[in-house]
Image (tube, grey):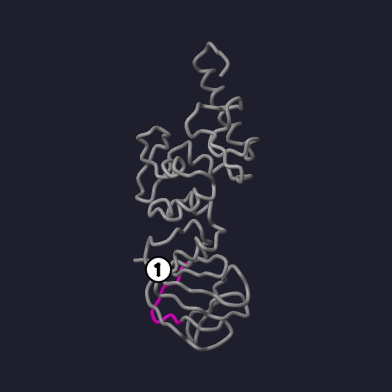
Amino acid sequence: MRFIKHPFMRVIYSLKLERETMKKIDFKQETFGYPEKGEPGFKGGGVYGKPFKDMHHQTAFLKMCFDYEIWDSDHKRVPLSFGKNSKNVLVQLWKKAEDLKEFKELIKCDPKARLLQFTGVLLGEDTDFLHSFVSAENYETLSDVGGLKVGNSSFNIVIPNGYGDGRTLVSLNGKGTFNTEAFNFWGTLKGDNIGIYSYDCGDEVIKTISGNFGVFYKNGLIILEEWI
């Protein structure tokens, strides 16, 4: 930072520089986190500016997760320090990974990291990651109108599967057992004896559920999360 005598103006200049840095989505050296030495906002060595050559583009939110506090999966505020005593799971996995591919595999397998908002945004289009949340209680249905038919003989609706015609995988999950940020939220289902139909244009019920459910969908997978 250039020398500015007045303390207040130094703060203003610092905030301006940081804001301009965070607006940079594509870094010249294809880095993630802070830019390379010599670029605006460089804050030193360590894992800052760690090059991942296959990281061509990421959102400002993902970069921000490495620099600011976020809520972890236990709903506790965690300072994203790059110090060796940092408790932030993302930072620890970032240090361990050799490249972006390995980093993604590490966060997929980590029980805390896989539930973070960061991970949901980063891996939201990864089919293997999405399907890793399918519970033991799951059903495959057919679709000709792009979704899952639920309800009863008096009233029923079709929930979009985010894919279209073909096969839809339906998973019944407990609360907090999957990364909601990786999916699209559709709405809620609440009632008794709600039928899940085998075909979105048919009348065969393959499962009946009762209770309050949050409905999430993505790429042909629908998750019904049981809410208390």
Picture quadrant of residue 202: bottom right
- Percent x, y of residue 62: 53, 44
Q: Nearer the viewer, residue 136 or 165?
A: 136
- Is 62 located above or below residue 201 in the figure? above
Q: Where's the N terminus, which quadrant?
A: top right
- Percent x, y of residue 156: 52, 81
Q: Amino acid at mark 1?
A: Asn
Q: Residues within 10 Å of mark 1 (few under 14, many from 20)?
A: many
Q: Nearer the viewer, residue 114 or 69?
A: 114
- Is 115 located above or below residue 202 in the figure? above
Element type at mark 1: strand
Tell me which secondary structure the magenta stretch mostly adopts.
Answer: strand
Q: How many marks?
A: 1
**Residue drawn at the location 46% of the way across and 78% of the way down:** 139
Q: Nearer the viewer, residue 190 or 199?
A: 199
**Residue drawn at the location 44% of the way across and 75% of the way down:** 138
- Is 100 located above or below residue 184 in the figure? above
**Residue drawn at the location 61% of the way across and 27% of the way down:** 39
Q: Is residue 194 magenta?
A: yes
Q: Which residue is mark 1?
A: 173
**Which residue is situated farthest in the top direction here?**
5
**Residue drawn at the location 57% of the way across and 59% of the way down:** 125
Left or right side of 47 for 144: right
- Percent x, y of residue 91: 43, 40
- Is 132 located above or below residue 51 in the figure? below
Q: Where's the C terminus, which quadrant?
A: bottom left
Q: Is residue 157 magenta?
A: no
**Which residue is situated farthest in the front direction here?**
98
> Which span of residues is magenta-colored?
188-195
Picture quadrant of residue 178: bottom left
